[in-house]
Amino acid sequence: MKVRVLGSIREVDRRAWDSLVGDDPVFRHGWFRALERARLDLAEPRHLLLEVDGAVAGIVPCFLQHSDPHATLIRRLLGRAADFASERALVAYSPLSQRSEWFLRADVDRVEALTLVRECMDSLCREERIWIAGWPFRSHSHSDPGSIALRSSGFCTGFLAPSAVWSNAGYASFDAYLHTLKSRGRRRYRAIRNELNRVRRANVEIDDRPLHSACAAELARLHAVHYREHNPARDCALGAEFFDALQSELGDTARLHGAYDESGLATYSIVLTSPTRWHMFLSGDRDHESAHRDKIHFTLNYYFPMQCAIESKVARLDYGLSTYAAKMWRGCSLEPVSFAVRAPSPMLQVGLRGLSALVDRWYQHKHRGFAHEGPPLAASDTI
């Protein structure tokens, strides 16, 4: 087995890549092609391709990370102290998705594969003068085979945050889903019914259509309004070229859930879809105040996609990190997410182990109010 470093997703056959990745929409070939085409100043591809006898046997999507609207790996570890350090890092993740993953053929030995990956990461870090590599959004438990393999590969770890997931429990209808919320508390059920009624009285039409049916410049303009409302101190809103890339590369798998009034598109949510799993991706508002006053934002991000998922028999909607109370209120559960980091220098690795322990305790404290399934990884462990 050998590892090949890819400077572009276009260096590997689409069918070979997607056959290994499966249905996860933020790791498929088209998603990475869209990121490259948009030329975002977030990260440069350094994908690791494991090959056996010339055939693709494993994939670790990796990037040389420069910035990220959600915070870089180094900023997550150092907080404000990152202002005095380079934020460049070699990161195994999918940009803009808050997810890290790796994919192997069933016949490939995980420990051997991760050993090769670790060695390749160390080599890349030395070549590009990067002091840290990591997996910042790795969801797993101690018993997961991937976790067992990672623990043997010299990564320092810690708990990062819970991630929200909505699971389709085989609901026969959207009303059946609402009934489960009623069983958890009539106050919650009445509040959600009130939100749905507010939208019905708002004189908007809500539908699902392919993303490529909309104007990229308009999507960018509405996204900027939404982004500035939630991130007033940052200027990382995505431009029209990004939406144009999504439209060109993802086809019908990128969906636009939109609310339309007499003037056109007023509020939207973008969903990256696959037959079994959807990624709740991005929002935009013409008028942020009215979108929240009339509860349109909540319908487009929760109730409408949940209804569509039930009708399409989709098993899972990924909602990611943050705003946990709102997501749990509407039926999402939380899964633990951990970070795994490594430095190519033995001296730095010792310091990183102590830093990881501090970061672990901080995030455990920060998210102590939210329950999650299974214990988070302890910082004293290595994976």
Image (cartoon, rainbow, N blue to C red):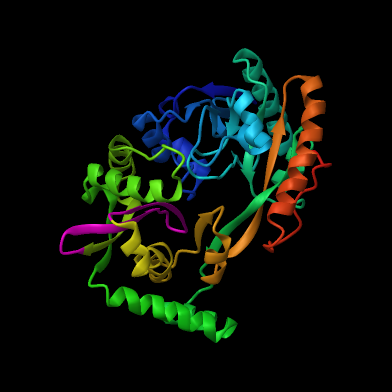
356 versus 266 height, above or below: above
Horizontal side of 233 relative to 142 (left or right) equals: left
123 versus 104 height, above or below: above
The answer to whether residue 173 is seen in the rendering is no
Q: Quadrant of the N terminus?
A: top right
Q: Which residues are magenta?
A: 261-286
| Residue 218: image location, x then y, percent | 23, 46
Q: Residue at x 24, y 69 (%)?
A: 204
Q: Quadrant of residue 57?
A: top right
Q: Nearer the viewer, residue 160 or 251?
A: 160
319 versus 356 height, above or below: below
Q: Residue at x 73, y 41 (%)?
A: 359
| Residue 67: image location, x then y, percent | 51, 31
Main secondary structure found in the magenta portion: strand
Q: Quadrant of the C terminus?
A: top right
The answer to whether residue 75 is seen in the rendering is yes
| Residue 111: image location, x then y, percent | 74, 36
Q: Residue furthest left?
A: 262
Q: Residue at x 39, y 46 (%)?
A: 228
Q: Nearer the viewer, residue 361 or 176?
A: 361
| Residue 11: image location, x then y, percent | 43, 24
Does the segment drawn in magenta span residue 281? yes
Does the segment drawn in magenta span residue 144? no
Q: Residue at x 76, y 52 (%)?
A: 143
| Picture mark count | 0
Horizontal side of 280 relative to 372 (left or right) equals: left
